[in-house]
Amino acid sequence: MIELEVLEKNGVDIYLIDGRKIKLFFKLSLILGDNLGLHSILGFTESFNSTYSCRFCKMDTVQRSLASLEDKKLLRDKESYETDILLKDPSSTGIKEKCIFNRLSNFHDLDNVVVDIMHDFIEGFVHRDMCDILDYYINKVKLFSLLDLTSRIKLHDFGEFDIKNKPLEILPNHLKNKSLKMSAGEILSFVRHFGIIMGDLIPDDDVVYRLYLNLVNILDIILARSIHKNCKGLLKTLVSEHHTLVLTIFNRHCKTKEHNLIHYDTVMHTSGPLINFSGMRWEAKHKESKMLAVVSNSKVNICQTLGVKHQLKFAYLVQSNTMFPTELLLGELKKVTTKTLYSVHNDECLIVNKLSHKTVNSYDWIEKRGIKYKSRMVSCTSHENQKLNFGIINYIIIENYIIYFSYQKLLTVFDAHCHAFKIINLKSDNYIVSYEDLVYIYPVSLIQKNDEYYILHHYLA
């Protein structure tokens, strides 16, 4: 705490490469964590069964279980916060103690508007919804069997990015206990691909499938890395519809952590895209410690052992100068003539008009700022008339330190039932786009089902 106060008030002196000295001040803006961690460090009650266990509002237990919209009148504010502190009664206020970080002049725990989408939504609502949806289709209306589902999952093409999170086999006791044995990443893969895997067996007007589509629409917004200003209020509407459907179809009430979902729209427009607060990367770090603990011969003080090993790894990263990813990694070099890339049908986007030499450097793959591109990948190349355009990469070219992608356009139509873009045709013309002109820098998944191809947008924003 003392260090934070010094950094905020006194700052540190930084010497620039030209010899000038500047003073740099630091401000604590947000504290991230899971629900229990945030409640503990910010001074809220750590019992989620208590009457007022929400750190955003003062809805009681019954109100939280039924609410589908945020009630502005019940939101916590700084004035009521100080009153609740003086009462010293967590059972009637939900506040255990005053947050120590409020000593900082630019921080207040009520301004710490963040959520953990991994525990609240992915392992909360998404998991519970999919359990109920599968139970409905398999055991109640018997639209398909568990064997049909598991066999299709085994044979399904999860694409370039989701194959590492391919869901495990679903057993009968998983549905009976309403507990899918999947990690957060596997749940995400399963939900995003479910429409393509089983959608052909489900009618368009099915009300439970409407709940599924609502769920993936919410997921798209929550996982988006940037949000358009015109989307204000969209998440709130989708969440309200979702909660109403869940209550109507399954007569299911919200758990405490799931209640946070009604505050997501406010959090997103106050603090930014929700994906930035996710705890998934922190949980992934735990795996490293678990592996080290298993192979360690000494169990006397396992915490110290793990701490030393983490320090040694950090020291190696610093000494080897490999702490941060290389700006650009290159695959195998191939010389390609511009004549090979020439397209007689498209004069305005010809690669020969962009590149000066007859022979150019082409690479089978590159990795730019930690994102890998390779030939035959699909990328979102442009945005015209509120429609996304996709292309399949044929060549990756670097000329005068500029990265170009030579691609063929994919003619697509959005299949709302599968919640994916369906490929209609592939144009033969070669087009070109530079890395800087890409609408979305992340490649997208190309999924094959029978003789059809789909583009599953990988967290497109």
Image: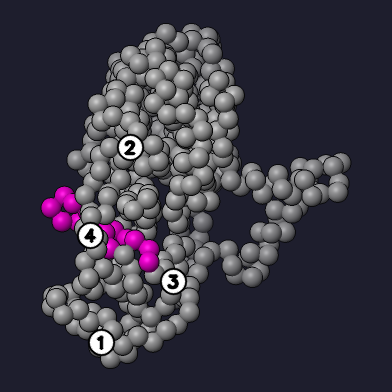
Task: Find disc 2 in the rendering and name its residue.
Answer: 200
Of labels 3 and 2, earlier in sequence is: 2
Q: Nearer the viewer, mark 1 or mark 2?
A: 2
Instruction: Say if mark 3 contacts mark 2, CB within 8 Å.
Output: no
- Spatial CA span between label 3 and label 4: 27 Å
121 on left or right of 236: right
What kind of element bears circle 4? strand
Q: How would you rate the neighbour count of disc 3 (Cα within 10 Å): few for under 14, some for 14-19, many for 20 or more?
A: many
Magenta segment range? 376-391
- Spatial CA span between label 1 and label 4: 24 Å
As for residue 384 lying within the magenta part, the answer is yes
Q: Main secondary structure of the magenta part?
A: strand
Task: Find disc 1 in the rendering and name its residue.
Answer: 339
Q: Could you say where residue 197 lies in the image, as x and y percent from the top left?
A: 40, 41
x 66%, y 59%: residue? 314
x 47%, y 35%: residue? 149
Relative to residue 142, is residue 91 depicted above or below?
A: above
Q: Could you say where residue 27 lies in the image, as x and y percent from the top left?
A: 45, 45
Q: Nearer the viewer, mark 3 or mark 2?
A: 2
Colouring chosen for the image of the structure = one colour
Q: Can residue 421 be seen from the camera position used here?
A: yes
Q: Nearer the viewer, residue 52 or 13?
A: 52
Task: Find disc 4 in the rendering and name its residue.
Answer: 425
- Spatial CA span between label 1 and label 2: 44 Å
